[in-house]
């Protein structure tokens, strides 16, 4: 039986991970969870998994109340809380499903443990600190598995003895793949909260609509698979999850019915492939697949990601921080949807890229950029 630590248990990926763990109690023991601010499902999680011993929460003001409510558990918070949980279970497999910048610290902290296995659903970690993460993996003999349909697909398509010629990264295009830039300015902004294929949280759905999610994935691919030869293909059906082209121009792709539980299960049981009750086979009798190279003039976010590949890593920190701040302003109805990515570019253009070498430097720049974005719009409105 494998011990599991699950950070981000109340989110979309966290909930799907819990479903797999619940359906396979003979294989896994969930020993610690993180729920951040979201206490809605905490009672149900604790009831379903009596093996839980520690719970990480974000608001320190809630600690005493929760401790009285659940005296059998230890409640922890802040970065030191992550450290305590990870130190308590040095052999546990860690699933990091925290979204945004907040997922970076537990990623780095997990990889400070020797021989740790980390299932990473926080793509921002690699965008912000890819070089540092790879250094930790090497120094501490850790394994990192990307809980992302595209990167899981690439992982499955790799051949140990063959050089990657190019990675073909697929993208659904979100709700607006068929619209021009001019047409984006006329949309109903609420439609950005929907996705034609995947059921996801609001933040990642908006990022998918703007293609900023794909921009982050480009940088994730670079740090995971060590190549800048990355081509984005618009593939609305989301059946081909990504592919690898080799030097003889043969292409190996991974296909499946879109289901994030399949990705999570694949890495929980790696290298064994185990079926789960929610999995479905492809129906080839009624299957149409279409592909179109992503136009960087249409999808500005992709162009910005390619710029990050050729500049010091602080530029990627600015791109991510500006996007998180601007996305929040959009949700608060202070800017329009079509303004998000152009303003990301604006803040990137006003930054002088430099190399950041540790978590504190990355956090400092992240906080500065978010303040600058919010101050800019406070003055504008």
Image (cartoon, helix red, strand yellow):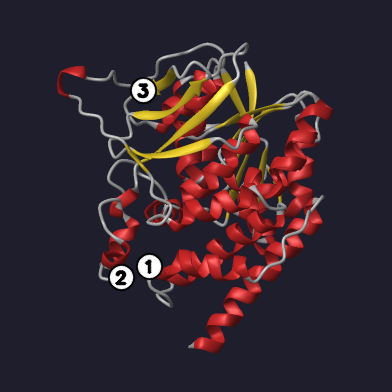
Residue beneath disc 1: 338
Residue beneath disc 2: 185
Mark 1 Cα-neighbour bin, 10 Å: few <14, some 14–19, many ≥20 = many
375 sits left or right of 255 in the view: right
Question: Looking at the picture, how far across and down is residue 326, in whole percent?
Answer: 51, 68
Mark 2 Cα-neighbour bin, 10 Å: few <14, some 14–19, many ≥20 = some
State how many labels appear. Answer: 3
Residue ID at (74%, 24%): 91
Residue ID at (72%, 66%): 352
Mark 3 Cα-neighbour bin, 10 Å: few <14, some 14–19, many ≥20 = some
Helix, strand or loop under label 1: helix
Above-or-below relation of 208 to 28: below
Question: Looking at the picture, how far across and down is residue 313, in whole percent?
Answer: 71, 52
Question: Looking at the picture, how far across and down is residue 172, in whole percent?
Answer: 34, 42
Mark 1 and mark 2: span between their CA atoms?
6 Å
Helix, strand or loop under label 2: loop
Q: Which mark is residue 255?
A: 3
Q: Are marks 2 and 3 in contact (CB under 8 Å)?
A: no
Q: Is residue 96 visible?
A: no
Q: From the viewer's side, name the closer residue of 128 and 5.
A: 128
281 sits left or right of 30 in the view: left
Q: Are marks 1 and 2 in contact (CB under 8 Å)?
A: yes
Q: From the viewer's side, name the closer residue of 312 and 370.
A: 312
Point out the frontmost of discs 2 and 3.
Answer: 2
Above-or-below relation of 328 to 273: below
Above-or-below relation of 290 to 319: above
114 sits left or right of 173 in the view: right
Please report whichever mark, 1 or 3, sits nearer to the chain's N-terminal start.
3
Please report whichever mark, 1 or 2, sits nearer to the chain's N-terminal start.
2
The quarter holding residue 371 reads bottom right
Residue ID at (37%, 31%): 259
Which quadrant is the N terminus positioned in? top right
């Amino acid at each position: 039986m494998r011990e599991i630590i699950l950070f981000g248990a109340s989110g979309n990926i966290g909930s799907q991970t819990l479903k797999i763990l619940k359906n396979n109690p003979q294989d896994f023991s969930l020993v610690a969870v993180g729920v951040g601010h979201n206490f809605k499902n905490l009672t149900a999680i604790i009831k379903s998994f009596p093996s839980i011993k520690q719970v990480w929460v974000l608001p320190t003001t809630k600690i005493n109340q929760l401790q009285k409510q659940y005296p059998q558990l230890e409640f922890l918070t802040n970065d030191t809380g992550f450290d305590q949980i990870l130190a308590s279970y040095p052999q546990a497999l860690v699933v990091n499903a925290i979204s945004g910048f907040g997922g970076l610290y537990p990623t780095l902290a997990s990889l400070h443990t020797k021989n740790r296995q980390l299932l990473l659903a926080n793509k921002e970690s690699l965008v912000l600190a890819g070089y540092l993460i790879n250094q930790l993996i090497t120094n501490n003999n850790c394994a990192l598995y990307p809980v992302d349909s595209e990167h899981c697909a690439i992982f499955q398509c790799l051949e140990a003895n063959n050089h990657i010629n190019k990675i073909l990264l697929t993208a659904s295009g979100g709700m607006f793949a068929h619209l021009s830039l001019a047409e984006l300015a006329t949309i109903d902004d609420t439609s950005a909260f929907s996705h034609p294929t995947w059921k996801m949280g609001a933040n990642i759905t908006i990022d998918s609509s703007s293609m900023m999610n794909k921009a982050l994935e480009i940088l994730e691919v670079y740090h995971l698979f060590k190549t800048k030869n990355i081509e984005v293909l618009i593939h609305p059906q989301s059946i081909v999850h990504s592919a690898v082209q080799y030097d003889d121009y043969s292409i190996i792709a991974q296909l499946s019915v879109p289901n994030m539980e399949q990705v999570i299960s694949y890495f929980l049981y790696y290298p064994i492939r185990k079926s789960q009750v929610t999995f479905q086979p492809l129906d080839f009798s009624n299957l149409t697949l279409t592909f179109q190279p992503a136009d960087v003039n249409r999808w500005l976010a992709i162009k910005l990601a390619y710029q990050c590949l050729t500049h010091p890593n602080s530029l990627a920190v600015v791109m991510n921080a500006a996007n998180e701040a601007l996305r929040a302003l959009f949700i608060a109805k202070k800017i329009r949807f079509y303004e998000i990515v152009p303003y990301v570019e604006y803040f990137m253009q006003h930054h002088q890229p430099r190399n950041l070498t540790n978590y504190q430097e990355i956090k400092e720049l992240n906080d500065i950029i978010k303040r600058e974005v919010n101050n800019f719009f406070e003055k504008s409105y």
